[in-house]
Image (cartoon, rainbow, N blue to C red):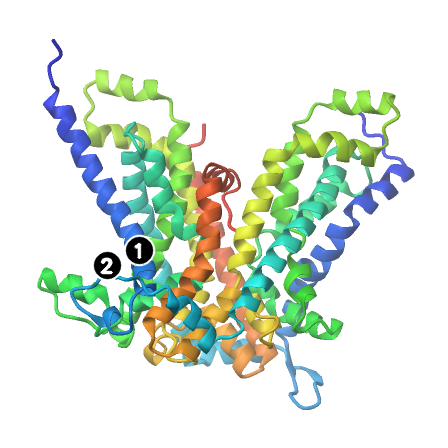
Amino acid sequence: MTERRTIKETIQAYLYLAPALLILGTFSIYPVIRSLLMSFTTVHRRSMEVEEIGLHNYRFLMEDPRFHLALRNTFTFVLGVVPVAIVISLFIAVLLNQKIRGAAFFRSVYFLPFVTSTIAIAMVWSWIFHSNHGILNYFLGFIGIAPRPWIEHPDYAMTALIIMSIWSRLGFNIVILLAGLQTIDKQLYLAARVDGAGVWHRFKAVTAPLLSPSIFFLMVIGVIGGFRVFGEIYALFASGATPLPGPANSALTVVYYVFQRFWDDRNFGLATAAAVVLFVIILIFTLIQFWLGKKLVHYK
Amino acid sequence: MKTINWKDVIKKAVIYLIVGSGALLMIVPFLWMLSSSLQTSHQVNLRPPVWFPNPPQWGNYQRILHYAPYFPRYFLNNIIVASVGTILELSTSILAAFAFSRLKFWGRDVVFYILLATMMIPAEIMLIPNFLTIVRLGWLDTYQALIIPWSASILSIFLLRQFFLGIPDSLSHAAKVDGCRNFRFLWAVMVPLARPALVTIALLSIISSWNAFLWPLIVTNSHNMRTLPLGLALFRGEAGTFFELLMAASVVVVLPMVILFVIMQKHIVASVSRSGLKG
């Protein structure tokens, strides 16, 4: 292709790009740079004067037990949700792919939470988890499990959050996995069957390797999404009008920490520093996953 | 005569059993939300639970207004923000994708790759500077604050650019011979051809804007500007422990997207597997 770039066409091109670049520049690119700079400052509340304080915010985070708790909770959440959600949805997706009638209907049912507001999801689950009148405790009673204070007690809060989040993520995973499964050549299964491979063996030899790009994609997206959890927590544990990151901060996550430092304490420098740490963690995890992915994922 | 393959029948039955009970677990919270919203404050606490309240308490939906008189306003705000935002996002994406796919200019690849790189950065890191920008612009508690920052999306530009690249060049040459200017060509030829990609962008934009929470939470502070998810979160404080009202309010938030989903199912599922991302 001949690349003939004229001044006229360049000007024209930037006119076409102007609206998008103006908005993305202002609200997506500039704030990233600004955040990095802000994390080395503190803003005085009264005078709004900005003072350079070097690494102070980062040092504070390293010693802040609340931030440590937020990190631990976030890791627990990601570890509790992402692998389990992928395994369950893999199982369901493989079954839905067996040419059963109504597969599209079932897929839609699983997918429903995706279009639903996370706040509304948290509302109905806080009702389901309710310790006295919740239907979860009622149903658990049938199989002899004593009622639990799912959202009122720190020992159960994270479990409740994880259950709800797995439930709400299944549909997205299933849709991605079904799309992946449909690209697998049916001949391969026939060939494996002729060779006498059983169900598990066919899964291991054909499905798993050929589906690994989709699974890998879900891991990356799931981990990133998991680190960013916020709205669900805000609404699930609220008592009255006051939002709570779980009883005794048992569901305080990094984004929630950022929100509190920013919104309640108005400590902009510290809040941005925490957000930068979150970004670095996500980046490291994504890079590790890509590095692992190169070794394990089977691309055609 | 055809013999029944029992092994196959059992296999199918087991699959239906597993997939079906899973689907039941998925749908029960929604049904419980709907059912609770139609019960009396007494029924809602009864165990065993009442699944089909008779008569259904449609009045609960009216009682929302008693505790949260601004709920209709939140609904209107959601519609305004979702529709205007989507139209703007479509416009900025069409224009930018056209430049990236059809025009040759200095800096094209550099600009494009910078944008792609920003797609990897979590939005939370932009939250505080964006809030300060909104304050400085004097946009706090306005529609602009809710709409403008989200009216261009790198993902949408990228999706549309890929689609435009697939449209044969010969069309553009033919149009040039006809004396068709770039903009008219874009509007009259490219845009109609790119309908599937535009539908994808519009659906994802509507869904993510309808359900947005953190951003509206920080840039609005009056009832006039609040959106539905925000109003719902606040409603908890206003309606206290009336779970039938809380569930009715949740139904109001959820229903429009469920209806959209039922109508556009195929498109939404295809959009998600195509783009793989939510907003």
Residue depicted at 35% across the width and 62% down the height:
A77
Q: Position of residue A171 (x, y in %)?
A: 37, 46
Horizontally, is B134 left or right of A62 in the view? right
In the rendered image, which quarter is residue A73 located in?
A: bottom left
Q: How many residues crowd mark 2 within 10 Å: few (<14), some (14–19), many (20+)?
A: some
Horizontally, is A14 left or right of A205 in the view? right
Indicate whether A138 appears above or below B9. below
Q: Which amino acid, mark 2?
A: Trp
In the rendered image, which quarter is residue A48 located in?
A: bottom right
Q: Position of residue B86 (x, y in %)?
A: 63, 51
Q: Position of residue A72 (x, y in %)?
A: 37, 69
Quarter of the image containing the N terminus of chain A?
top right
Residue depicted at 10% across the width and 23% down the height:
B6
Q: Position of residue B267 (x, y in %)?
A: 50, 38
CA gap between label 2 and label 1 equals 8 Å
Q: Kindly indicate whether the residue at mark 1 contacts the one at mark 2 (C-beta within 8 angstroms).
A: yes
Instruction: Say which residue label 2 marks.
Output: B51
Q: Are marks 2 and 1 on the same chain?
A: yes
What is the chain letter for disc 1?
A: B
Pointer 2 or 1: first along the chain: 1
Residue sitting farthest toward the front: B55
Residue B203 visible in the current orientation:
yes
